[in-house]
Amino acid sequence: MLVDMPSTFTRDELLAAAGRLLPDVLVPGLDVLLCGINPGLWSAATGHHFARPGNRFWPALHRSGFTPRQLRPDEQDLLPTWGLGITNLAARATARADELTRAELTEGAAILRAKVADYAPRWLAVLGVTAYRTAFGIQGAKVGPQESTALAPTRLWILPNPSGLNAHYQLADLAEEFGRLREASGAGQRG
């Protein structure tokens, strides 16, 4: 359902969203399951993934060729049309991902493993190398394809965090990294 998303929230409205859960966009047999770190307060307030203005997820997804046009966060349920889905490592909404504990990320990795086993996406893409390292205990991981067979037959790819707070990657860089995964996975060819 498409709805007009608020262009702003009060501080109290955002704080009231802390701890809210955001449903996954997840169906069996996806080409790529995109895994964020956790919902931000803006996403929790709207009920849509990567909803905060300034988050570069939706522009990077489109510019990389995964979707034929740039989707709005309230169109997230269209993603399976192109073989894509969204989940998060940690369910709890926070203002910043660094508010999560190591235990929350580790527990999230176990839950993510179970989702991957149940839904069998061809690829899992974790958006955030530092969160991946913490959650899975793999300190040498870098952005790109991973050699790990822990989720086999699902293959693993690490993407940069698309948050506007990640100054290491500009939108063009994010789109290039997303594009490498799209080419390797063949995703975005449905629809």
Image (tube, grey):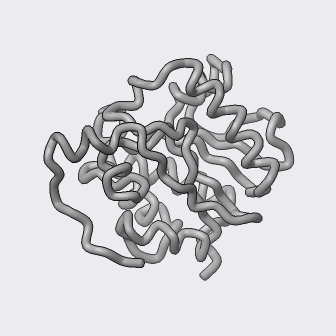
Residue 135 x %, y %: 62, 26
What residue appears at the point 29 percent right and 51 percent down from the top-left corner? Answer: 52
Identify the residue at horizontal 57%, vertical 27% (top origin): 105
Q: Is residue 181 above or below residue 70?
A: above
Question: Which residue is found at the position 28% from the left and 42% from the top?
Answer: 16
Task: Point out residue 28 in the picture as x, y percentages from the top left corner.
Answer: 75, 64
Give the residue at x 52% y 40%: 91
Left or right: 17 as drawn, with respect to 109: left
Q: Quadrant of residue 120?
A: bottom right
**Quadrant location of the N terminus?**
bottom left
Residue 3 location, x and y as percent? 31, 75
84 sits to left or right of 153: left
Depth order, front residue of 152/146: 152
Q: Nearer the viewer, residue 29 or 1?
A: 1
Quick check: 178 above or below 76?
Answer: above
| Picture quarter with the C terminus | bottom right
Residue 110 higher or lower than 56, as above or below: above
Residue nearer the viewer, 1 or 187: 1
x and y, in percent, of residue 133 in the image: 60, 23
Quarter occupied by residue 79: bottom right
Give the tally of numbered discs: 0
